[in-house]
Image (cartoon, helix red, strand yellow):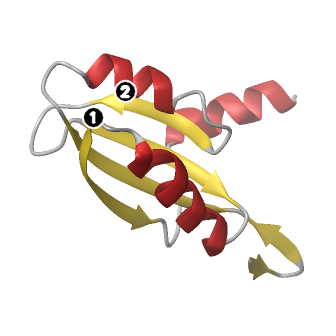
Amino acid sequence: MWQKEGEIVAIKAYVLMKVNSGTEREVCKRISEFDEVLDASIIYGEFDLIVKVSVNELDSLETFLSENIRNIPSIILTSTMIVAREYVGKNKRNNLKANSN
């Protein structure tokens, strides 16, 4: 687990996926049901889906990908990008400040 000044930091990753044509919505809905999934979106371009996941350790990410994602028959290819550092956008920061007051 990665740690930052005594606190546990979740490991986040984006998983890009190519799926069989016409299965985008079905696969996206199915993937969004996993506890590890923060967001799942259908996209245009080289890949069909992008999924943001959060796990507590790298072993959990490997298990999630190999046992859950790669066992869905419609998924042809995955490419996983582990987040090194994450920044919150201005609009979201302002909303967080407004909600904390």
* Residue 96 position by quadrant: top right
Residue 72 horizontal side relative to residue 74, left or right: right
Instruction: Please tell me the numbered disc located at residue 74.
Output: 1
Label 2 environment density (alpha carbons within 10 Å; few <14, some 14–19, many ≥20): many
The amino acid marked with disc number 1 is Ser
Q: Residue at x 64, y 73 (%)?
A: 59
Q: Residue at x 82, y 70 (%)?
A: 8
- Element type at marker 2? helix
Q: Residue at x 44, y 32 (%)?
A: 40
Which one is in front in this view, the residue at disc 1 or the one at disc 2? 1
Query: Residue 17 location in percent, x, y?
Result: 27, 45
Query: Residue 63 location in percent, x, y?
Result: 59, 62
Q: Residue at x 17, y 18 (%)?
A: 22
**Which residue is at the front of the view, 20 or 81?**
20
The N terminus lies in quadrant: bottom right
Q: Are marks 1 and 2 in contact (CB under 8 Å)?
A: yes
Residue 3 horizontal side relative to residue 65, left or right: right
Distance from the alpha carbon under mark 1 to that under mark 2:
7 Å
- Element type at marker 1? loop
Query: Residue 15 location in percent, x, y?
Result: 38, 52
The amino acid marked with disc number 2 is Val
Which circle's residue, 1 or 2, is located before the other in the chain? Answer: 2
Q: Can residue 88 be seen here?
A: no
Label 1 environment density (alpha carbons within 10 Å; few <14, some 14–19, many ≥20): some
Q: Where is 7 relative to 95, above or below?
A: below
Residue 69 horizontal side relative to residue 97, left or right: left
Residue at the spot of label 2: 27
Instruction: Please tell me the numbered disc located at residue 32.
Output: none
Q: Where is 69 relative to 100, above or below?
A: below
**Which residue is at the front of the view, 2 or 99?**
2
Q: How many marks?
A: 2
Q: Can residue 35 be seen here?
A: yes
